[in-house]
Amino acid sequence: MSMKPLRILPLFLFALLIIEVSGCHRKTHITAITPGTVEMNSSVQQNDSVISSILTPYKTGMDSIMNVVIGTTTAAMPKEREKSETLLGNFVADVVLNSGNYAYTKTENTTPAQVCILNNGGLRSSLPQGNITRGNIFELMPFENEIVVVTISGQKMFELLKYVAASGGVPVAGMKMGIKADRTPGNVLIQGVAFDSTKTYKIITSDYLANGGDKMSFLKDPIKTETTGLKIRDAIIEHFLELTRQNKSVTPALDGRIYYETK
């Protein structure tokens, strides 16, 4: 899973710094370069003036992008685990399903995917109530993961349902599912229709999970894999921007899409 947050500065810039310093002191020469990263935070101001002259303009430029407000929320969406469903998981899964399907069906004469499945570990931070900045979304989704559509058999779809039940719930959209007391699948509706193991299903997810990440082996070796060319992070950002153009806010909600059966 590749991570490329814009708040991190590659240390190759320090190689340029060393070259600059060595130009002032002829006896100094480069003996080694160690790759790494530097957090673009207030600590850069504590470096000497030469380092600051390189880092500060970069940080200022990043801040001018990351601090832009792109939308608002009516409630906070905390990063939570050990819950059958969460405000954050529902929100992101809904965006990925809807935006992913829009990108998928826009260029292909095909039917949309029925279900989105994501993983809790892929959501890296909470979203606050009120103003949401571009930086908030990069913190939530710092990975370069793209949205893909995998077509799987009914048997593999049942493996997906068993995974969701055994996990006690993960971010999903397009389905409603009961979990039995022994953490096996109960009643399942896919787009309002009862699950049928004889049918095939289209699943929208990240390219990381489609390759079997987070032990989702049921997504590997599918009947078909199709790309959308859309990154999850970009889909979330565009969703906020579109609502802002409509003078609307994100209103997160729990809707019982994953629940524990009482009988």
Image (tube, rainbow, N blue to C red):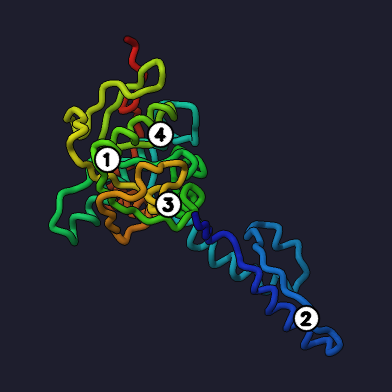
Query: Which one is in front in this view, the residue at disc 2 or the one at disc 3?
Result: 3
Quadrant of the snapshot with the C terminus? top left
Front residue of this view, candidates 224 and 230: 224
Distance of label 2 from label 3 (alpha carbons): 39 Å
Which amino acid, by three-letter code, is at mark 2? Ile
Residue extending furthest top?
263
Which amino acid, by three-letter code, is at mark 1? Val
Q: Is residue 2 above or below residue 54?
A: above
Residue extending furthest right?
27
> Is disc 4 in contact with disc 2, using a CB cutoff of under 8 Å?
no
Q: Is residue 89 above or below residue 188?
A: below
Distance of label 1 from label 3 (alpha carbons): 17 Å
**If you read the primary sequence from the N terminus, does the residue marked by circle 4 or circle 3 appear first?**
4
Element under label 3? helix
Q: Which residue is found at the position 71% from the left and 69% from the top? A: 34
Residue 83, image x and y in percent?
A: 45, 26
Which amino acid, by three-letter code, is at mark 4? Val
User: What label sits on residue 30 in the rendered view?
Assistant: 2
Q: To which residue does mark 4 refer? A: 170
Q: To which residue does mark 1 refer? A: 115
Front residue of this view, candidates 150 and 206: 150
Front residue of this view, candidates 166 and 177: 166
